[in-house]
Every structure is written in structure tokens, then in C-alpha cells.
Amino acid sequence: MKDDTVNPTNSFKDRPATVAVSKAQEFGAKAVGCASTGNLAAAVAAHAAKAGLPCYVFIPADTEANKVLQAATYGAKILSVNGTYDETNRLAAQASEEYGWAFANINIRPYYVEGSKTLAFEVCEQLGWSTPDSIVVPTGSGALLCAIWRAFNQFNELGLIDNKRIKVTAAQPHGCSPIVSAFKSNSSDVEPIEKPNTIAKSLAIGDPGDGLYTLRAIRESGGVAESATDEEILEAIQLLAKTEGIFAEPAGGVAIAVLKKLIDLGEIAPDEKIVCCITGSGFKASESILGSVSRPLEIEPTLESLSKVIN
Ligand SMILES: *Cc1c(COP(=O)(O)O)cnc(C)c1O
């Protein structure tokens, strides 16, 4: 497990956000911002706070409460847009042009995407400069998956790792899986999804910005793309928590659920060296997870009361 739940703002988005905000500062930007499904909002807000820059984050109105709370606490101005992520992203792109702000995943995206390469660099380092056979990546826009793919290729070109093919696999929620659909239908086009519907809100991007590059990376690496239903995602969150002690948000559940499915299908062999990206903390999406775990046992402060519920 590559556990990014313990990053400074509890998701992998600290990786691209820190590079984006540092570059914005270098360029003399007066303000920074982003369009976000939630985690990037918190990450850019935190890094902007440290940099002393005003921050404007654009999120869809149905973003999880704790992600909004977190970004607001760091002092960001939050624009909650009545619309899908794609509509939110379009407005943010217009705003970045209108006001000249540096938007992490829009006008300074080329720098933003570089930051996520550190995930794969760390994987190599933490495996003692060896590489996994497979890596399973929760995928929304595809930026993370492409960054991981580039990072392995660059380390390979530098001679830091063995020249071995690493299968890069995309994991998407069933309610928003345009890349999986394109992969399975052997298409070279990614057909956008109008209305994503999934508890994995950080992956609810109907029109993935890096969709075509993602497809290419999956195919060139020999990986696959697979989806998981909301129910499978919730089961996977508990499986991961109960076996590894890692509390993941639904995006991490998607990676685990897809990994399980691919092993069951024989697409990934059980003896492969597999890295699974756990990209965000369960505390980010408590409302989605709450209904699927057992309730506390309510008792009186007596041993007698306790004895009735134990066993
Ligand atoms: C943003 C995000 C992803 C996917 O990132 P993309 O680069 O858009 O594919 C995965 N997991 C979590 C928790 C995220 O916040």
C-alpha cells in the first residue's frame, strides 16, 4: 500500500499542490486557486496559506463537508458551484483568465502534474530501488496515473531502476468510468459522462482532461482498466481498514476493490509485486462511509450492562 492518507492535508494532492504553489510564487502570481473535487481544494489552500497568497477554490456543490471544512479552515475563498465538476472546471478556467490567478490544475497544470511523480519515485526508493510488477491507481482526470507512468520511465532512463515493464492499471468507480469504458471497448476515444454518480467523489470527473494519455499509458505498460460499484468500494474500505489498519476514502476503496477483482479474474497474479495507491483519508468522506460500518454498542456504565452486549 502506498499510503497517502498521512500526507499534510491527508491526500496525495499535496504532491502536485506544493509544486504548483511554489511555481505560482516564483512567477509572482497575486493569487492562486484550483478547480477541485475536494482534495485539491484543501491541498492548494494549505500550501497557499503557508506561501501567504490568497486562494480561490472552485468546487461542485455536492463536495464532501470535511473537504470543504478543511479548505475553509486554511483560509481559502470557496466558490461552491451548482453543477458538475466539468462545469466547475470550465468556470474556473474562465476565472483564471479573467483575473490572472494561477490555477494549479489549469494554467499552471504543466508544473502541477510534475509533483505527483514523487509518488512513484518514493515507491522505487521504498522498495529498495526495485520496482513493482503492477501499480493500481485510482483515476479521475488521469493526471496522477500519467505522472506515475512518466516517473517510472524517467527513473528507468536515468538507470536508477531495472528496465522492466511496470503494468499501470486504472481504477474507476462504476458511476464514473469513462476511461474503463474506452479501454474495454478498445476505443482510442474517451466518451465523456454527462452526470457522474458515485460515492467516490474525488474521482467524479466525467470528461477526464488526460483521458487519451491515460489510455495510452495503460496500453503501453500492459496494464488494464477496471471499475468497482459503490457497494464494492465500501466493502473494500473496510477490508483495507481491518487488514492493514489504513482508513481510506472511497477513492482508495476503488483501488482495493479493483485490485481484488483483477486478482479474482486472473488479470493480476497473486504472486506479483503489487503497489496499490491509497490516495486519500477516510476522514475526508465520513458521510459516505458512516452507514456501512457497525454502530457503537450503547450501554449503561455498569458491568452488568456490558455483559449483555459482549459475546
Ligand atoms: C484527485 C484524486 C485522484 C485522482 O486524480 P487524477 O489525477 O484526477 O486522476 C485519486 N484519488 C484521490 C483521493 C484524489 O483526490
Image: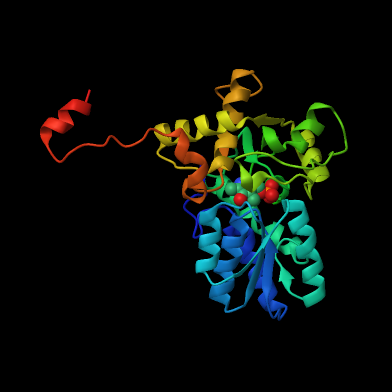
Identity of the residue drawn at 79% across and 38% down: 215
**Between 23 and 153, which is closer to the camera in this rendering?**
23
Q: Measured along the vertical axis of the image, is residue 255 above or below residue 77? A: above
Q: Is residue 120 left or right of residue 107?
A: left
Identity of the residue drawn at 79% across and 64% down: 93
Identity of the residue drawn at 79% across and 40% down: 193
Q: Residue furthest left?
A: 303
Whether residue 77 is visible to the viewer of this picture, yes or no, is: yes
How many discs appear? 0
Residue 31: image quadrant is bottom right
Identity of the residue drawn at 77% across and 55% down: 87
Residue 310 screen position, x and y as percent: 21, 27
Residue 100: image quadrant is bottom right
Quadrant of the drawing holding the C terminus: top left
Whether residue 120 is visible to the viewer of this picture, yes or no, is: no
**Between 242 and 229, which is closer to the camera in this rendering?**
229
**Between 192 and 301, which is closer to the camera in this rendering?**
301
Residue 47 screen position, x and y as percent: 57, 69
Q: Is residue 263 left or right of residue 149?
A: left
Residue 150 screen position, x and y as percent: 72, 49
